[in-house]
Image (spheres, rainbow, N blue to C red):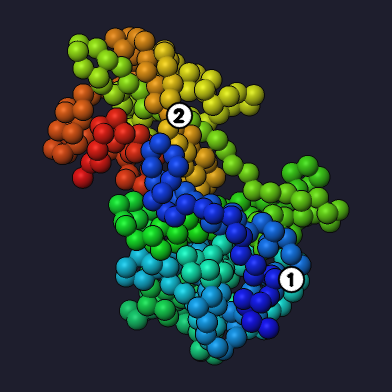
C-alpha cells in the first residue's frame, strides 16, 4: 500500500498560513506556526507511529517518505547551512526501531513532530544513539581522531558530517530568512524540543504517582489506568513600556542583573495562579519599574520552549513616566530612549538588545517602526 492511499497519512485539509504570513500584529515570529499541531487525528490512530517507521525503513524513495532528525535537549543535528540533517534508514537499526514502536515505552526516544512543506512526516530521535544507530562498527569507538573522549552524540555528528546547534541559535539564523522551508523546519524543531523537555520530567502521573508511558506518537502520556496527561505550557507576559513626554514618544527598557552589563530588554514575568494576562502586565510593571499602566495593546505571542513558556506580547502606555525606577532585585537599571537614541546606542555598541529570534526584539522594533541591523 502506498503512503498516499493509507488513511494513516491523511493530511489535514485545514488551511494555514505559510511562515512569514502570521496573523499577529507583530508579523512573523520565529518558532511560531500551526503545522506541528495539525495532526491530532492522525496521532490518535492506532499503529500510526509503527506505520511511519515502516515507511521510513522501506528501501524505495518517495517525495513524502518519512524522515528522521536527531534532537538532544535544546539542540538539533544540522548541516553547514543550518538545515536539519536527515538520518538515513541504512544507519538505523531496523529491528530496534520496530521493537521500540511496537511496545509501550517510558522514554520518548522517537517522537512524531509534524510534516515538512512537501508533506513528509518528520520523526525525531531524541537519544540512545548507540542503541538506535548503526555506526557500521562492531564496537562503538568513543575516541576522537586526537584521542579525546567523545559522547555517542558526537560520534553520530561526526558520522553524518554535521554539528549540533541549539534551536535558539537556529531561530536567530532563521529570523530574517526568506526561506519558507527553513522556517517550517524551525517550527518542527521547536515542537521537538518542547516535547522532549516535557517527557523528561513526566515519567510519573502528578496526580497518582503512577508510571506513565508515551502515547499519541509522543504528544501525550498515559498511566496504567488510562488517564492521559498532556504537555503543559507556562504563560508569561512580555511588555514594551512607552510614554510620551518632553514632546517625544519614548520606550523604557530595563537591564537585569542576570543579563550582564549593558544588555537592555523589555519587561517580562510569569502569569500567576488566578491571574489574567492583563493583570499580570500591571503587576509586573509595578514590581519591576513602578510603571502604572494607562492603556494596553496586545501584539502577538511566541512559544519559547526553553523549557515550556508561551510569551504573550504587549505594548503598555504608562501614566507616570517620571516616577519609574528599577526594583533593585531583578532589574538593576531602567532607561528611557527615543527612537533616535535607541538606534544610536544600539549601532554604537553602547547597549545590547535581545536576540533577533525573540518577541522582545520584535516589540522593540515595533516601537521603532523598522528592524535593527
Residue 19 position in % (x across, y down):
42, 54
Kindly identify the residue that appears in the image at 45 percent across and 59 percent down.
Answer: 184
Image quadrant containing the C terminus = top left
Image quadrant containing the N terminus = bottom right
First in sequence: mark 2 vs mark 1: 1
Foreground residue among 349 and 331: 349
Relative to 6, 227 lies left or right: right
Number of residues whose C-alpha sits closer than 10 Å to that of mark 1, classed few (under 14), some (14–19) or many (20 or more) = some
Relative to 47, 79 lies left or right: left
Residue 193 position in % (x across, y down):
52, 56
Disc on res. 68: none
Q: Regarding mark 1 in the picture, which secondary structure is present there?
A: loop
Q: CA distance from mark 2 to mark 1?
A: 42 Å
Q: Nearer the viewer, mark 2 or mark 1?
A: 2
Q: Which residue is farthest right?
A: 225
Say if residue 96 shows up in the picture: no
Kindly identify the residue that appears in the image at 34 percent across and 51 percent down.
Answer: 175
Disc on res. 47: 1
Kindly identify the residue that appears in the image at 74 percent across and 64 percent down.
Answer: 45
Foreground residue among 261 and 304: 304
Residue 164 position in % (x across, y down):
40, 65
Kindly identify the residue that appears in the image at 31 percent across and 12 percent down.
Answer: 321
Q: Regarding mark 2 in the picture, which secondary structure is present there?
A: strand
Against 93, is 356 above or below? above
User: Can you tell which quarter of the image residue 199 is in?
Assistant: bottom right
Say if residue 20 shows up in the picture: yes
Q: Are marks 2 and 1 in contact (CB under 8 Å)?
A: no
Residue for badge 2: 298
User: Can you tell which quarter of the image residue 339 is in?
Assistant: top left
Relative to 14, 258 lies left or right: left
User: Can you tell which quarter of the image residue 161 is in?
Assistant: bottom left
Residue 189 position in % (x across, y down):
48, 59
Amino acid at each position: 500500500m502506498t503512503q498516499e492511499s493509507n488513511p494513516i497519512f491523511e493530511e489535514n485539509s485545514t488551511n494555514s498560513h505559510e511562515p512569514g504570513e502570521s496573523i499577529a500584529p507583530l508579523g512573523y515570529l520565529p518558532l511560531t506556526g500551526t503545522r506541528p499541531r495539525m495532526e491530532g487525528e492522525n496521532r490518535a490512530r492506532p499503529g500510526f507511529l509503527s506505520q511511519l517507521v515502516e515507511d521510513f525503513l522501506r528501501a524505495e524513495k518517495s517525495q513524502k517518505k518519512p524522515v528522521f532528525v536527531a534532537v538532544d535537549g535544546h539542540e538539533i543535528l544540522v548541516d553547514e547551512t543550518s538545515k536539519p540533517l536527515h538520518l538515513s534508514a541504512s544507519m538505523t537499526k531496523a529491528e530496534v526501531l520496530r521493537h521500540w514502536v511496537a511496545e509501550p515505552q517510558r522514554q520518548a526516544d522517537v517522537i512524531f513532530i509534524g510534516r515538512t512543506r512537501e508533506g513528509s512526516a518528520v520523526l525525531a530521535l531524541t537519544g540512545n544513539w548507540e542503541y538506535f544507530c548503526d555506526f557500521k562498527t562492531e564496537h562503538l569507538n568513543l575516541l576522537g581522531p586526537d584521542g579525546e573522549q567523545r559522547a555517542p552524540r558526537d560520534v553520530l555528528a561526526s558520522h553524518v558530517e554535521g554539528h549540533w546547534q541549539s534551536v535558539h541559535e537556529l531561530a536567530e539564523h532563521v529570523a530574517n530568512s526568506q526561506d519558507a522551508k527553513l522556517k517550517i523546519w524551525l517550527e518542527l524543531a521547536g515542537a521537538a524540543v518542547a516535547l522532549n523537555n516535557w517527557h523528561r520530567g513526566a515519567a510519573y502521573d502528578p496526580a497518582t504517582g503512577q508510571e506513565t508511558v508515551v502515547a499519541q506518537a509522543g504528544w501525550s502520556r498515559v498511566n496504567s489506568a488510562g488517564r492521559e496527561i498532556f504537555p503543559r505550557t507556562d504563560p508569561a507576559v512580555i511588555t514594551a513600556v512607552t510614554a510620551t513626554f518632553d514632546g517625544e514618544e519614548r520606550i523604557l527598557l530595563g537591564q537585569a542583573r542576570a543579563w550582564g552589563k549593558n544588555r537592555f530588554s523589555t519587561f517580562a514575568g510569569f502569569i500567576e495562579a488566578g491571574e489574567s494576562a492583563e493583570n499580570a502586565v500591571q503587576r509586573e510593571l509595578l514590581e519591576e519599574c513602578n510603571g502604572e499602566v494607562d492603556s494596553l495593546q496586545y501584539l502577538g505571542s511566541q512559544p519559547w520552549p526553553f523549557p515550556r513558556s508561551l510569551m504573550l506580547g504587549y505594548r503598555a502606555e504608562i501614566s507616570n513616566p517620571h516616577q519609574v525606577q528599577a526594583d533593585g532585585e531583578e532589574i538593576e537599571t531602567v532607561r528611557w530612549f527615543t527612537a533616535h537614541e535607541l538606534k544610536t546606542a544600539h549601532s554604537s555598541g553602547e547597549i545590547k538588545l535581545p536576540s533577533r529570534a525573540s518577541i522582545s526584539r520584535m516589540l522593540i522594533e515595533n516601537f521603532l517602526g523598522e528592524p535593527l541591523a
